[in-house]
Image: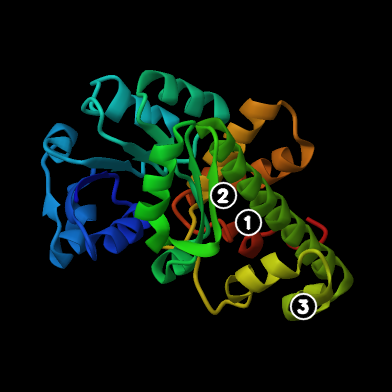
């Protein structure tokens, strides 16, 4: 098929590369340099969103958030009538309902996971629309992105959006838990490796394993998998959706400290590697 992909940041590029194996792609990004990998792989680069979607049989968006979706897609009425719109952007359930009301072919397709699973085609993927036939079509289209056990069709765009927010709530809160565990270790004379080892049999084992390389200094946070800015944006979506969530609020406070320090585009592991010294 002829597919337009709008948004070729870290995740959007990985998703598009999978589609490029079987489809003709025309891609666009606000920062043109970020289309370079896809151009080298054989995708056509468009100068504007309108040029990208011209003649497309499916439009895929992977934008920074709901405001970017409104600006890029809704305000210019970009989606041609009858063309499926596959939106992988993380949005709130209210946003998803708004987009589905505006464009009947809207399908919320948020992905769960970082760049490693994206490259391996092992992401969690929700496909949300009330149109059962369209849902089945899009489940097939995006299957190269997904771990088959984690590819789920749901009956509304809003439900898909909730699934993604739940995943990012778990990620943000567990990262804050790991941050506090490391601070407890600092205060009691344990080095980070000892803390990571002790957490191996606890509910924080998953996040300790995922972020251990950053904590040990085996990886730097610059150019990481999931930026501080991105997860902070998602934490704000959570708070806007559900009201006060104290654990999410604590995580957001740690993330905002990193933004204030100029590390917004670093991997969000920065909240683990940049902690106050014991007693501070």
Q: Badge 3 local density, few (<14 within 10 Å), some, or many (20+)?
A: some
Across and down, in percent, residue 248 comes to 71, 41
Q: Badge 2 local density, few (<14 within 10 Å), some, or many (20+)?
A: many
Looking at the image, what colour scheme do you see? rainbow
Mark identifier at residue 258: 2
Q: Badge 1 local density, few (<14 within 10 Å), some, or many (20+)?
A: many
Q: Earlier in the sequence, mark 2 or mark 1?
A: 2
Q: Secondary structure at mark 3?
A: loop
Question: Relative to 70, does residue 232 appear above or below in the rendering?
Answer: below
Q: CA distance from mark 2 to mark 1?
A: 7 Å
Across and down, in percent, residue 186 comes to 80, 68
Q: Earlier in the sequence, mark 1 or mark 3?
A: 3
Q: Secondary structure at mark 1?
A: helix
Look at the numbered discs 2 and 1 and tell me whether their residues touch, using CB distance below 8 Å: yes
Look at the numbered discs 3 and 2 and tell me whether their residues touch, using CB distance below 8 Å: no
Q: CA distance from mark 1 to mark 3?
A: 17 Å
Dividing the picture into quarters, in which one does residue 188 lie? bottom right
Which residue has dot 1 on it? 271
Identify the residue at image location x=74%, y=62%. 178
Q: Secondary structure at mark 2?
A: helix
Furthest residue in direction right, as rendered: 188
Total labels drawn: 3
Across and down, in percent, residue 219 comes to 51, 74
Q: Earlier in the sequence, mark 3 or mark 2?
A: 3
Identify the residue at image location x=76%, y=56%. 177
Identify the residue at image location x=44%, y=32%. 131
Which residue has dot 3 on it? 191
Question: Relative to 272, does residue 28 appear above or below in the rendering?
Answer: above
Q: Is residue 218 visible to us here?
A: yes
Q: Nearer the viewer, residue 164 or 2?
A: 2
The C terminus, quarter of image: bottom right
**Viewed as shown, does residue 35 lie left or right of 221?**
left
């Amino acid at each position: 098929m002829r597919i337009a992909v709008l948004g070729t940041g870290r995740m959007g590029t990985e998703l598009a590369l999978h589609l490029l194996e079987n489809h003709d792609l025309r891609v666009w990004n606000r920062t043109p340099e970020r289309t370079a990998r896809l151009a080298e792989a054989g995708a056509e680069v468009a100068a504007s969103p309108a040029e990208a979607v011209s003649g497309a049989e499916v439009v895929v968006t992977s934008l920074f958030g709901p405001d970017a979706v409104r600006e890029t897609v809704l305000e210019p009425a970009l989606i041609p009538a009858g063309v499926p719109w596959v939106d992988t952007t993380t949005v709130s359930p209210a946003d998803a309902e708004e987009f589905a009301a505006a464009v009947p072919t809207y399908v919320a397709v948020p992905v769960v996971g970082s760049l490693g699973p994206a490259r391996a085609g092992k992401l969690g993927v929700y496909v949300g629309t009330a149109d059962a036939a369209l849902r089945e079509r899009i489940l097939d289209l995006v299957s190269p992105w997904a771990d088959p056990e984690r590819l789920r069709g749901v009956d509304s765009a809003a439900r898909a959006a909730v699934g993604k927010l739940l995943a990012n709530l778990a990620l943000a809160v567990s990262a804050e838990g790991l941050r506090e565990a490391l601070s407890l270790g600092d205060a009691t004379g344990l080095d980070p490796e000892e803390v990571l080892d002790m957490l191996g049999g606890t509910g924080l084992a998953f996040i300790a394993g995922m972020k251990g390389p950053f904590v040990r200094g085996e990886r730097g946070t610059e150019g990481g998998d999931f930026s501080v800015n991105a997860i902070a944006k998602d934490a704000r979506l959570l708070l806007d959706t559900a009201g006060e969530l104290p654990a999410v609020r604590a995580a957001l406070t740690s993330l905002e400290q990193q933004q204030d320090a100029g590390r917004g585009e670093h991997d969000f592991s920065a909240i683990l590697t940049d902690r106050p010294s014991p007693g501070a």
